[in-house]
Image: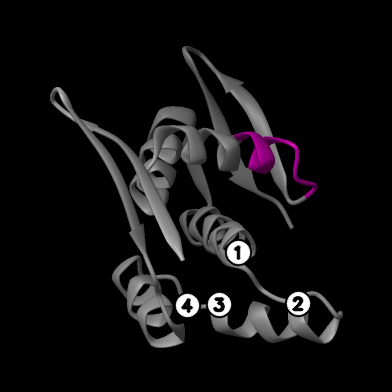
Amino acid sequence: MLRIRGSIGDWPVDLTLELDEQDWARLGGQLQVEKVEAAAPAASTAGKPVNQDDALWLIAQDLLRQAGQLSGPDLLARLESLTGSAAAGKRLLVRLRHSAGVKVVSGGDTPLYSWVD
């Protein structure tokens, strides 16, 4: 299930979408993310079910892994697009910043996020 909250102009929006495995696969294909399916079985074999937050986390990691390096604003824009929410995008950005597989370097005005794992 995916929940989108926010506003369009003055109109509040609170939308809940139910996505099955095929929908998630199509969404991942639209984002050109390839390794989500390979990572999902590894998570489930560890005894943890893959929920929406876990799936978004895997997609966010793959997004940065495939890009190699992104500026903070570019990465945040992609994460917000992925989640449909500015707040959820920021949470993923903070989680990436503190991830062992990510290196963050000050790049002048904006930080640069690089995949190092």
Q: Are marks 3 and 4 in contact (CB under 8 Å)?
A: yes
Instruction: Give the number of the mark in front: 1 or 3.
Output: 1
Horizontal and vertical percent for residue 57? 60, 57
Label whose residue precedes the other's in the sequence (3 or 2)? 3
Q: Dot 3: what SS?
A: loop
Residue at which label 4 appears: 34
Q: Residues within 10 Å of mark 1 (few under 14, many from 20)?
A: some
* Span of residues in magenta: 94-100
- Closer to viewer: mark 4 or mark 1: 1
Q: Amino acid at mark 2?
A: Ala
Image quadrant in which the C terminus is located: bottom right
- Disc 1 + disc 2, Cβ < 8 Å: yes
Which quadrant of the structure image shows residue 28? bottom left
Q: CA distance from mark 3 to mark 4?
A: 4 Å
Magenta span contains residue 29: no
Please tell me in which quadrant of the rendered image residue 56 appears: bottom right
Identify the amino acid type marked 4: Glu
> Which residue does the numbered mark 2 point to in the structure image?
43
- Is 64 placed left or right of 17 in the picture? right
- From the image, tell me which residue sits under label 1: 58
**Which kind of residue does numbered mark 1 sit on?**
Leu
Element carrying mark 2 = helix
Residue bearing mark 3 = 35
Q: Which mark is residue 9?
A: none
Residue 76 lies, with reference to residue 4, above or below; the image says: above
Q: Residue at x 15, y 22 (%)?
A: 10
- Residue 34 placement, left or right of 47: left
Spatial CA span between label 2 and label 4: 16 Å
Q: CA distance from mark 1 to mark 3?
A: 8 Å
